[in-house]
Amino acid sequence: MAEAEAHGHGGETRRDFIYLLGGAMGAIGAAAFAWPLIDSLSPAADTKAASTTEVDLSAIKEGQAVTVKWRGSPVFIRYRTKDEIARAVKDDKASMPDPQPDAARHQDGKPQWLVMLGVCTHLGCIPLGQSSSDKKGDFGGWFCPCHGSHYDTAGRIRKGPAPKNLPVPDYRFVTDTRIVVGEKPKKAAA
Amino acid sequence: MAMQPAPQPRWMRWVDSRLPIFGSMAHFNAYPTPKNLNYWWTFGSFAAITLVVMLVTGIVLAMHYTPHVDHAFDSIERIMRDVNHGWLLRYVHANGAAMFFLVVYIHIFRGLYYGSYKAPRELVWWFGIIILLCMMATAFMGYVLPWGQMSYWAAKVITNLFSAIPLVGEGITTWLWGGFAVDNPTLNRFFSLHYLLPFVIVGLVVMHIWSFHAVGNGNPLGIDVKSPKDTLPFHPYYTVKDVFCIGIFLLVFAAFVFFAPNFMGHPDNYIPADSLVTPAHIVPEWYFLPFYAILRATPDILFINAKLAGVIAMFGSILLLFLLPWLDNSKVRSANYRPAYRVAFWLFVIDCIVLGFCGAAAPEGIWLDISRIATAWYFFHFLILVPIIARTERPKPLPFSISEPVVKTAARA
């Protein structure tokens, strides 16, 4: 009868409760220890710290493009011609996978400066179109040779497997001819 | 008739009574193996010996390799030029990866032809698929280590597959990279995992072999062993056959290593990684081409965009294999007795080869159309054709036992 006394009344026993509690504590302990291991793989503090790049735009002529490295990835900076801007604005209403007006692709009052991450949103290749001899695709912007994505003169995806427009990173005009990539624009300037 | 094993020395008995290690080895010696296994059954041994070769060369290569973005490429060049026999170790390791996939693919097709995935060997099949997935991960991460152009862009493209996952995709890729692009943290963790996974594969191979030793080997007739007359002890009959065949396999392996070591490689990988320039034509190694073709061929499907659909189709093409024992519920295992399935099998082999060519070609024009048809056929084969055949086909009569046809043929001669 000592056995029966160790049991509770409603069919559940103290031993069941201890099993459950022990199991739960074990699971929580394992999860608590797993988290530091998993999170250690996320970007480290020094990786995050090296996250702004300053660029001098004064040497770039109209129609030219430069590529700078920011956070290990290329950033495309293009001084767009009037034609290219007009072509992008004209297509604002065209059907595209990731619709965005040209105005949302550049900072206010500076439509000539297009600053984007030069990383194809499909699988991460670097699209062609930065140098004048490059293949620029069907829309005169950029063309990704890996899997055939075409971007227009505002860096919007128009054709091919990429799902999104080339992302516009945070960047701030320090002066009219200098930008810092990786910093948000100041509210007052906007 | 059975050979009496020599009595064990005292020290062996001492060990065995504490840890039955020699007794287990005796299991492998005496393991009753169907006596009608053909040469396609030796490819499992080829895979095993290749795994050992990869482990041994890999461990030594790791002693000379530096997993850092500034030094990785140079350390590989040092292995090629300065380390004693380094060129040999690296070429054996690099070509060994290709040979590994070659023999494993043949091994898998053998399983598909002879119905090796059917009851009671579903777990053998499952462990095999898991081994294949681990091999793919290991091969991919190993390919990244030399830090050449193809290494870098392979890492970039493949890790970007995970960015297709809705909502959490971007976060997952950043976590995989340990940064905001493929960089030193990525290389370090790939090296660590590339060293780890082969040992995981060894463990899985043990499970793979254990799971068919428990129920016995399949065989080309696809019928069960009925009596001891149908089998031979594994040693010496199959050990000798396997060793002889491994000799021939190693000749082919050596031919690549010594006479065409870069035949299956890409010259672009002898250019150091440059994160700002993508090579004009990036393709994976040949053993990934069919899957690469499926990835690129998949268009938008309903509300799923082409990128995500491609990733789902590519992973799905392998995960689908887990269901095969139930998709094909025909009781007859061997395609020799299944006229319709046999045709479907060979069409599937052709389909995989076509997908391979599609994966190597640029995804434009006619090649895109062919890849789409071949991709559709891949899924049609497993999801529609095989289940329908299994449920409607009239198989040919099976022989009564494994020894019966042999006895008949002998009588006729």
Image (cartoon, helix red, strand yellow):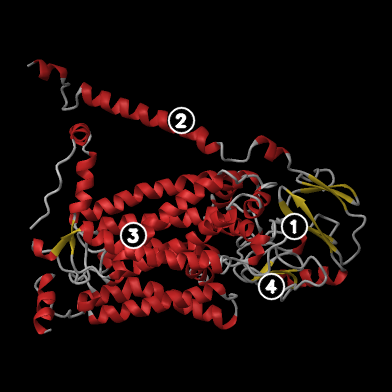
Would you say residue B166 is visible in this rendering? no
Please tell me which residue is depicted at 66% across the width and 64% down the height of the picture.
B268
Write down the chain letter for disc 3. Answer: B
Bin the neighbour count of mark 2 within 10 Å (Cα to Cα): few under 14, some 14-19, many 20 and up: few
* Residue A116: mark in rendering: 1
The lab-note entry on whether marks 3 and 2 share a chain reads no
Mark 4, secondary structure of its residue: loop
How far is the residue under mark 1 from the one under mark 3? 53 Å
Would you say residue B257 is visible in this rendering? yes
Please tell me which residue is depicted at 35% across the width and 46% down the height of the picture.
B203
How far is the residue under mark 4 from the one under mark 2? 51 Å
Q: Nearer the viewer, residue B254 or B185?
A: B254
Residue at numbered disc 4: A94
Q: Are marks 2 and 1 in contact (CB under 8 Å)?
A: no
Residue at numbered disc 3: B45
Q: Is residue B380 above or below residue A27?
A: below
Is residue B288 found left or right of B249 in the rendered image? right
At label 1, which amino acid type do we have? Met
Write down the chain letter for disc 4. Answer: A
The lab-note entry on whether marks 4 and 2 share a chain reads yes
Q: Are marks 1 and 3 in contact (CB under 8 Å)?
A: no
Mark 2, secondary structure of its residue: helix
Q: Nearer the viewer, mark 1 or mark 3?
A: 3
At label 4, which amino acid type do we have? Ala
* Residue A32: mark in rendering: 2
Label whose residue precedes the other's in the sequence (4 or 2): 2
Write down the chain letter for disc 1. Answer: A
* Residue A15 location (% of width, % of height): 22, 23
